[in-house]
Structures are given as C-alpha cells and as structure tokens.
Image: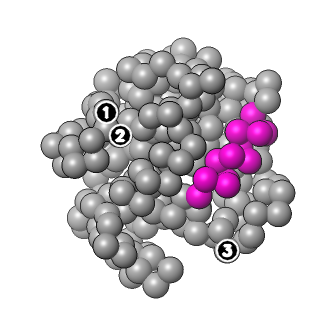
Amino acid sequence: MLKQGIILAGGKSSRMGTNKSLLPLGGKTSIEHIFNEMSLFTDEITIVANDPTLYRFLNTDIVADRYTGKGPLAGLESAMYYKKADLYFVAACDMPFVNKSVYDWLQKQISHYSAAVPIFNEKTHPLAGVYKREVLPKVQEQLAQNNLRMKSFFEHIDIKYVEDYNGIPRRVLEKHFFNMNHPDQYREAKLF
C-alpha cells in the first residue's frame, strides 16, 4: 500500500502577516517539523505550493495548484492528480506539531470508507485527514462547480468521522490539532 504525505503550503498567510510554513520553531521551520514527522509513516511527501522555490531545501516533490486560487480543496486535488497512491495523509503547513500516532489511528479507522476525518474539541479538521484515491473525481467535480469548501465535498463521499482516539494522550492531540494563524498563536507555539 502506497502512502502519500501531502503538506498544503499554498495559503496567503494574511492573518499571520508572513509565511507561516517558514516560521522558526526550535531551530527548524514549521514545515520541517511537519515533513520530518510525516516521513515516519509515509512513503513519499509532496508539498503543494504556489512558489516552489521556497521549499526546495526539503528535497521533495513540490506541485502547484492546478485550480489556482481555489483553496485547500485545490491543493488536495493537485497532489492526488500528480501523485498516485492508495492513501493520502494531509497536513496544513501551519500545524507544526502533527503526530504519527494520530495518523496511524486514522488509517486504522478508514477501513471501507473513502476518508477518515478527525473531530477534536467539537471541530472538524479536514486538513488533518486521511483520504483514499477514489475521492479524486469527487474533488474535481466540486472544484469544477466552484464548491470550494471541504465540507461541501464531504457530502459526496463516504466519511468516517473520528472522535475517539483510543487513549492517545490529550496533550498529544492538543498539539497535533494546533494551528498557527495569528502572531499570538505563533508565540504560543514557541512555548510548546
């Protein structure tokens, strides 16, 4: 089974005021933390970014959105279009503390479903989910209709929503689902 990691780094970072993925945390950039963790459980990692030159230092495949300006759904589409795999593990570039144990658990939950999407603290986290290749035509359909919200795409696939994490410590989960959108969240991340 081929496992593809996807790091979505195409956002504008407008709330942060600077590129979130390149913010330093403990001697490494945010995206390096994600890349290093994802390399523990995937066969390959692709970064979806509109400026590939920013990420060449990671020595991995970088693709641009095929549907420009269409948000994370377009990022998912590009990675799936260019990279054939059985499972796609997604992380947003502003989630520096993603954890292998959470993705391993999501993979165990996917079974006959098309996707395993986590819910934590009553919030759905589509950009930390696991998706099967079979969802690609549905993603493309939604993009063609300009339905850009991940949740509208979810209405067209068979999803397993995961709320029970089988004893993964709460602190691990809080860090895994933490994302940095604002400067105060970046300051918080530096304290982790």
The amino acid type of the residue labelled 3 equals Arg
Q: Of callouts 3 and 2, which one flags the residue occurring earlier in the amino acid sequence?
A: 2
Q: Amino acid at mark 2?
A: Ile
Dot label at residue 29: none
Name the residue beneath numbered marker 3: 171
At 28% from the left and 47% from the top, the residue drawn is 58
N-terminal of the pair, mark 3 or mark 1, is 1
Callout 1 crowding tier (Cα within 10 Å): few <14, some 14–19, many ≥20: some
* Residue 151 drawn at (x, y percent): 61, 39
Give 14 or 24, whichever is nearer the viewer: 24
The residues tagged by marks 3 and 1 sit, at their Cα atoms, a distance apart of 32 Å
Question: In the shown orientation, is residue 67 left or right of residue 120?
Answer: left
Residue 54 visible in the shown view: yes
Tag 1–tag 2 contact (CB < 8 Å): yes
Identify whether 142 is placed above or below 61. Answer: above
* Label 3: element kind: helix
Q: Which residues are magenta?
A: 99-110
User: Which is closer to the viewer, label 3 or label 1?
Assistant: 1
Residue 92: x and y in percent read: 45, 50
To which residue does mark 1 refer?
61
Taking the magenta stretch, the answer to whether it contains residue 159 is: no
Tell whether 183 sits left or right of 188. Answer: left
Instruction: Please provide percent x and percent y for residue 60.
Output: 31, 38
Q: Residues within 10 Å of mark 3 (few under 14, many from 20)?
A: few
Cα–Cα gap, marks 1 and 2: 6 Å
**Depth check: 114 or 181 in front?**
114
Q: Residues within 10 Å of mark 2 (few under 14, many from 20)?
A: many
Q: Which residue is mark 2?
A: 47
Residue found at x 39% / y 26%: 78
Occupied quadrant, residue 164: bottom right
